[in-house]
Image (cartoon, coloured by chain):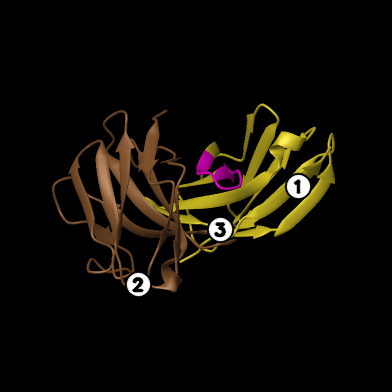
Amino acid sequence: SAVISQKPSRDICQRGTSLTIQCQVDSQVTMMFWYRQQPGQSLTLIATANQGSEATYESGFVIDKFPISRPNLTFSTLTVSNMSPEDSSIYLCSVAWDSNSPLHFGNGTRLTVT
Amino acid sequence: SQQGEEDPQALSIQEGENATMNCSYKTSINNLQWYRQNSGRGLVHLILIRSNEREKHSGRLRVTLDTSKKSSSLLITASRAADTASYFCATDVNNDMRFGAGTRLTVKP
């Protein structure tokens, strides 16, 4: 299995600012995803990070709010832009080697917006 | 959007007892997966069961799948305090992974 390093592990940010979360994997992976988990809730898929092209966003999530980069097969970033308290959540990076493989997760970034 | 629903939402048992969690889903699936999440951590994959399988074992874990009822169960035998965590089922529908709301399991020593 992969080692997935996610940074920062937590942050407290002021409304109106932006935060970029990094996800680094110790091996090349085909698929990378970003999830959001609100307190006490399940995981919601934000987008699939595509290497060398624009991310594929799920319904309710847009690129202007959650820009994603994936310059290579081991690294991705998620930016939470123009934050509001409603963006307070845990953001999780996950990877899979192929479409039939289970997901492997980073430890998440716990974001609090004040 | 969510696909699976876990039942119960919370479960509290004594160490040594068995814990059973159920997951129901709505559409046909390629496979169903169970994950564990310790507080403040990422999810850890436990077991994957394909749509053509009915039962799978991994150590103290036993997963069943009934595609006719669109349901799955996760059994943890001889539970330990370290099993305290949230457990999520996730359904794979054409490579689209959807997570349920989870069951919060507490195992008392």
Q: Magenta segment range?
A: B34-44
Tell me the residue that label 2 is attached to.
A60
Q: Nearer the viewer, residue B29 or B62?
A: B62
Chain shown brown: that is A
Q: Residues within 10 Å of mark 3 (few under 14, many from 20)?
A: many
Tell me the residue that label 1 is attached to.
B106
Location of residue A43 in the rendering, given as x and y in whole percent from the top left corner: 49, 57
Tell me the residue that label 3 is attached to.
B100
> Which kind of residue does numbered mark 1 sit on?
Thr
User: Total of numbered circles in the picture?
Assistant: 3
Q: Does the magenta run of residues contain A58? A: no
Residue that appears at 34% across and 49% down: A33
Q: Is residue B52 visible?
A: no
Mark 1 and mark 3 lie on one chain; the one further toward the N terminus is 3
Q: Is A39 placed above or below B50 here?
A: below
Q: Is residue B101 visible?
A: yes
